[in-house]
Image (spheres, rainbow, N blue to C red):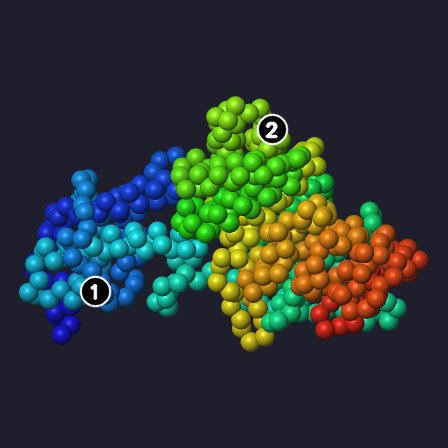
């Protein structure tokens, strides 16, 4: 076929293309409304995006894919009212480009009629809507993340979205000094070598420097990789009066958003959408049920079944997914069974009274940004624990469903850093299974977990395979129990004694450290 046969011919004139009414399938029309509303909410727009902008996205998404096996049988698509005129769909300046693309894509020769062109456009809009819907559901992402990711697809024609990640090698130092003691030999190592666990644990008694050192190490990771960070700050050290404070305020990173939970809602829809499938819905409902039950008093089997069913119904409905909706639905079940308000309702009521979560962002959009979340305004320790666990549940559901992060040579690409201060809240006997899964499986997804805790006892409830995924441990002077030391000994590769973590052995600024491929050693992390 010659180039002339691929060029818009006389039948496809500007006036003819403009004058057509292009219809939408039932699916495309429904998805247009949902996509438009989601985009307006995510961008904070006071008015809806222009219709032609949304439909051009659908059209372009389909044209981008291979047209092999492209189904043009209009009898299989039901069309609704409210078509869009060609002059609005294609505009004035862009019409020649669109016409050429559609003619070439459809191999419309001089024998083709205007109806062939119109049919091609309508089928592409339907197909594009279905493809975008599939993109969003497959990766549990929001529309903003989809737009960012899809804009990067400039040189390939893969039907799988490329998730952004950093390919840089991250060379880490153990604090601002990072010198072996007493030799003063500099200590640095690669955090993201293939096959090496990237997760980090820091421990130490109050005022020993674990938090300061941890924040310094987190800054190194973010500076070198530019990945988003989620810092969970139970004590409120890093957010004051709605602004970043302490050492993190000095970071040269204006993209970090501070949130003081209880005063400003966390903008996270922590429940996955119904597109995750039956198994995904069941798993998410069980995670929410278990997290809530661990933060309530005396939750029995009937209560657990009740809250599980409520969460499952709300996810399947995909309408109002707020905590208020969950609380109201749970109360309706109690009323239906003529039961009094229980501890589950009380905990849900606390979450809604303080307006902790507001489901305005999908997990994909939320975890693509950087946050410092202070829990200082939340008085209840059980409620603090529940907030942390719900954040981890959402992180696990989203991040572990992503494809494995890319490997470049010996370097594993990084995607996210999650820092949890006062981690003993979620490492107790009733521990967060989502944290366990993020540590065990997060390495292949490019996730780095940093845990800050008081002493080795915090790890005594964790299994050996959990601790084997902690690649780096920085322990300042702290108390220690035999069970905690026994668990930690597997990480250090030797039997540990309380004396190893005493003030006598670990004076100011010194820590007993273990990092990949290196025997444990004393390291000066800060001070002289």
Task: Please identify the residue farthest to the bottom as the structure is shown.
Answer: 409
Nearer to us in this view, 321 or 260 = 321
Nearer to us in this view, 15 or 485 = 485
Q: Which numbered circle lies on residue 342?
A: 2
Q: In screen coordinates, is 25 left or right of 42?
A: left
Name the residue beneath numbered marker 1: 105
Q: In screen coordinates, is 313 left or right of 507?
A: left
Q: Residue at x 69, y 65 (%)?
A: 468
Q: Residue at x 30, y 62 (%)?
A: 64
Q: Position of residue 18 (x, y in %)?
A: 14, 49
Q: Label 1's element?
A: helix
Q: Are the two marked residues, 1 and 2, in contact with CB atoms closer than 8 angstroms?
A: no
Q: In screen coordinates, is 70 left or right of 108?
A: right
Nearer to us in this view, 307 or 378 = 307
**Quadrant of the snapshot with the C terminus:** bottom right
Q: Residue at x 34, y 67 (%)?
A: 157
Residue 362 shows in this picture: yes
């Amino acid at each position: 076929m010659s180039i002339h046969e691929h060029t818009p011919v006389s039948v496809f004139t500007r006036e003819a293309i403009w004058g057509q009414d292009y219809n939408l399938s039932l699916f495309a029309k429904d998805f247009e409304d949902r996509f438009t509303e989601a985009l307006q909410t995510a961008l904070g727009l006071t008015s809806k995006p222009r219709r032609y902008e949304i439909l051009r996205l659908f059209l372009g998404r389909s044209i981008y894919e291979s047209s092999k096996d492209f189904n043009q049988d209009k009898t299989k698509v039901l069309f609704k009212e409210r078509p869009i005129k060609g002059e609005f769909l294609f505009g004035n300046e862009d019409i020649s480009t669109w016409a050429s693309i559609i003619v070439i894509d459809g191999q419309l020769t001089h024998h083709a009629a205007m109806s062939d062109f119109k049919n091609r456009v309508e089928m592409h809009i339907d197909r594009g809507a279905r493809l975008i819907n599939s993109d969003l559901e497959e990766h549990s992402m929001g529309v903003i993340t989809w737009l960012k990711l899809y804009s990067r697809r400039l040189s390939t024609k893969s039907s799988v979205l490329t998730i952004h990640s950093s390919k840089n090698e991250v060379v880490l130092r153990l604090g601002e000094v990072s010198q072996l003691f007493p030799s003063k030999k500099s200590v640095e190592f690669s955090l993201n070598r293939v096959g090496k666990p990237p997760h980090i644990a820091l421990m130490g008694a109050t005022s020993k420097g674990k938090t300061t050192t941890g924040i310094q190490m987190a800054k190194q990771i973010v500076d070198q990789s530019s990945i988003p960070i989620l810092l969970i700050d139970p004590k409120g050290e890093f957010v004051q009066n709605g602004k970043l404070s302490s050492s993190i305020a000095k970071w040269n990173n204006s993209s970090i958003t501070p949130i003081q939970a209880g005063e400003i809602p966390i903008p996270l829809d922590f429940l996955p959408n119904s597109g995750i499938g039956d198994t995904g819905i069941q798993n998410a409902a069980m995670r929410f049920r278990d997290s809530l039950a661990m933060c309530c008093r005396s939750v029995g089997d009937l209560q657990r079944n009740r809250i599980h069913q409520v969460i499952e119904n709300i996810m399947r409905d995909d309408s109002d997914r707020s905590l208020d909706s969950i609380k109201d639905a749970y109360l309706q079940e109690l009323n239906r069974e003529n039961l009094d308000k229980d501890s589950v309702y009380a905990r849900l009521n606390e979450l809604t009274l303080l307006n902790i979560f507001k489901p305005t962002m999908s997990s994909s959009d939320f975890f693509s940004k950087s946050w410092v979340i202070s829990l200082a305004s939340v008085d209840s320790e059980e409620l603090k624990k529940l907030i942390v666990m719900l954040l981890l549940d959402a992180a696990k559901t989203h991040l572990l469903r992503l494809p494995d992060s890319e490997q470049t040579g010996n370097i594993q690409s990084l995607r996210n850093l999650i820092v949890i201060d006062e981690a003993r809240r979620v490492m107790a006997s009733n521990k967060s299974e989502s944290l366990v899964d993020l540590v065990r499986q997060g390495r292949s997804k490019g996730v780095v977990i940093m845990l800050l805790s008081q002493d080795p006892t915090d790890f005594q409830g964790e299994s050996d395979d959990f601790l084997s995924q902690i690649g780096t441990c920085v322990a300042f002077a702290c108390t220690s129990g035999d069970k905690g030391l026994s668990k930690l000994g597997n990480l250090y590769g030797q039997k540990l004694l309380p004396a190893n973590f005493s003030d006598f052995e670990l004076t100011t600024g010194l820590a007993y450290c273990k990092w990949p491929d290196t025997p444990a050693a004393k390291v000066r992390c800060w001070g002289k």
